[in-house]
Image (tube, grey):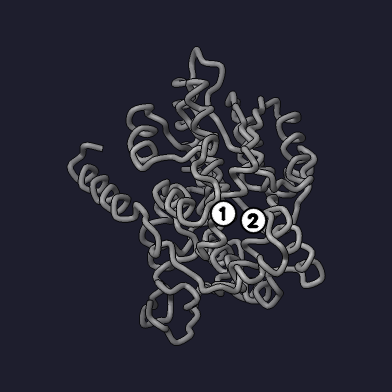
Amino acid sequence: MLNLEYQMCTRTVMDTTDPDISFDKMGECHYCEKFDNFISKNWFPNKEGERKIKEIVSKIKYEGKNKKYDCIIGLSGGVDSSYLAYKASQLGLRILAVHVDAGWNSELAVKNIQNIVTKCGIDLYTHVVDWEEMKDVQRAFFKAGVANQDTPQDHAFFAALYTYAIKNNIQWVLHGGNIATESILPEAWGYSAMDGKHLRAVHKLFGEKRRLKNYPVISFFKYQFYFPFVRKMKVARLLNYMPYDKDEAISVLEKEVGFTYYGGKHHESRFTKFFQSYYLPEKFGYDKRKAHLSSMILAGSCTREEALEELRKSPYDPSTIEGDIEYVADKLGFSLNEFKKIIDQPKHSYKDYPNNESLVKAKVKLNQFLKRKGIR
């Protein structure tokens, strides 16, 4: 990793805390070029998006014919998934919502989920993760010193969602990922949570349980081939086909379903709140607000000046952070001193542990080749 002289993009607020960033002669980062030339081509917050949504929804309904549900959605109680569920229900889709309780829900998140499914007439299944195994995997990831501490939760979320999709013969997954607020995410800041080899390697090295009996680990083959090709599962990111402004979405949800905002992106989970607002900035110097705000700048929903003003604020509340650290440490079975020592230990890249990155890159190249040949 090169030690770069500090530089911030002249268009966004991305900077050299992303070790892989590069800049053109105008001082704009490579994310701007990627957005302008590629990502924006798949974003339709306009009349064309309305037409595309109708086509997608029509296809989902057709393929869901004679089934109980048209599609499945993972509900966290956060803004993105909540707004998506609300809009999808308005489009007349028969939705099965799955919520995975990994032990870190805020009370607001639980209340939001109940309000959404009740007001929108959506069936809800709540999957409760084996806490002792989840705790062991999370402890292992902290000891490994890697950046993406959300991997244990996110991997379990995906596994449960797809398991219940298959169980209910559902092929379409509604995904809350969106270009308006998430077009930028540096790989160094958060390696894929879906690398089962990486997860198993970290757990084998640092976990205390010999093996995981109930925690579901998704293999490379299952994720990259079985789900999309054998089960023919498809993902619809409907938020990319409509105007999506976070503040407006919150206002609509508050009015229509009694939604309560919890403050901060992904702060519906007490763990993710601690991880993104304290652990990443303090240990790695990664402030995910930069990626989020930069995405909004490129989407036109935020100015660079507004983003810089937001970044002048601390990513966490100094008056409550000690209590948050104690809560996370205690829940994971660490003493406070032990936990702080672990956080202060040398940081590690996901590359320091076995992973499937080379296979994933080979799969991407294969997809590109097949697409050029008109096979996919």
* Viewer-nearest residue: 184 or 217: 217
Q: Could you say whether the residue bearing mark 1 is in a helix, strand or loop?
A: loop
List x then y, in percent, for residue 17: 50, 76
The residue that mark 2 highlights is 272
Residue 73 appears at what percent x and percent y?
57, 34
Please state which of residues 76 and 341 is positioned toward the viewer in this rendering.
341
Q: In the drawing, does residue 34 fall left or right of residue 362?
A: right
Q: Secondary structure at mark 2?
A: helix
Mark 1 in CB contact with mark 2 (< 8 angstroms): yes
Q: Residue furthest top?
A: 66
Q: Tell which circle, 1 or 2, labels the residue nearer the N-terminal end.
A: 1
Mark 1, Cα crowd under 10 Å, few <14 / some 14-19 / many 20+, is: some
The residue tagged 1 is 150
Quadrant, the C terminus: top left
Q: Residue at x 39, y 78 (%)?
A: 23
Horizontally, residue 46 falls left or right of residue 367, namely: right
Rendered position, 120 above or below 131: above
Is residue 219 shown left or right of residue 115?
left
Q: Quadrant of residue 258?
A: top right
Q: Position of residue 26 (x, y in %)?
A: 40, 81
